[in-house]
Image (cartoon, grey):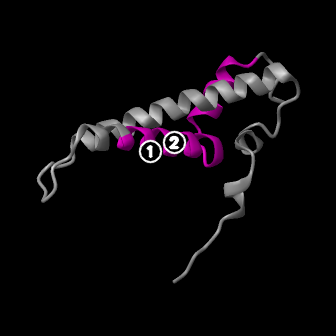
Amino acid sequence: MNLHVDPRMYMNQSETFNTSAKTPGDAAMRNTCAEFEAIMLQLMFKSMRSEEPVDGVIEGSNAQSIYQDLLDGRIAQELAHRQSLGVGEQIYRQLAPTGADGS
């Protein structure tokens, strides 16, 4: 049994996305952009699950659906904050005041 533990899993969520934040407002804007990316990812997961065939041995319940949505939301947050797809960063670059991101 191979149990690989990734040390990044224990980092603060905002550490990877907010590394270049110069002011508290800058950090808040970066965090908001990452949260928007998480919402987009969660909607993408939900859309992908709706196309999944429902045939199976065990019928799905309402509770199973709720927990699946919660899991998808948490995975989306982790992806957006730790392994960003770049959507949040692009939104930040468009919304940030000129010179705030060092360009």
Q: CA distance from mark 2 to mark 1?
A: 5 Å
x and y percentages locating residue 10 in the rendered image: 71, 55
Residue lying at 64% horizontally and 47% vertically, measured from the top left? 82
Instruction: Tell me if residue 94 is in the magenta stretch.
Output: yes
Relative to 5, is 96 above or below? above
Q: Which residue is mark 1?
A: 71
Q: Classify the position of the C terminus by image quarter.
A: top right
Q: Is residue 99 at least partly visible in the picture?
A: no
Q: Is residue 21 left or right of residue 96?
A: right
Q: Is residue 68 at least partly visible in the picture?
A: yes
Amino acid marked by disc 2: Arg
Relative to 58, is 2 above or below? below
Residue 66, quarter of the rendered image: top left
Mark 2 and mark 1 residues within 8 Å of each other at the beta carbon: yes
Q: Which residue is mark 2?
A: 74
Q: Main secondary structure of the magenta part?
A: helix
x and y percentages locating residue 22 in the rendered image: 88, 28
- From the viewer's side, name the closer residue of 5 and 17: 5
Range drawn in magenta: 67-96
x and y percentages locating residue 87 in the rendered image: 56, 34
Relative to 7, is 79 above or below? above
Please tell me how crowded label 2 is: few (under 14), some (14-19), or many (20+) other residues with Cα within 10 Å.
Answer: some
Amino acid marked by disc 1: Leu
Residue lying at 21% horizontally and 47% vertically, measured from the top left? 52
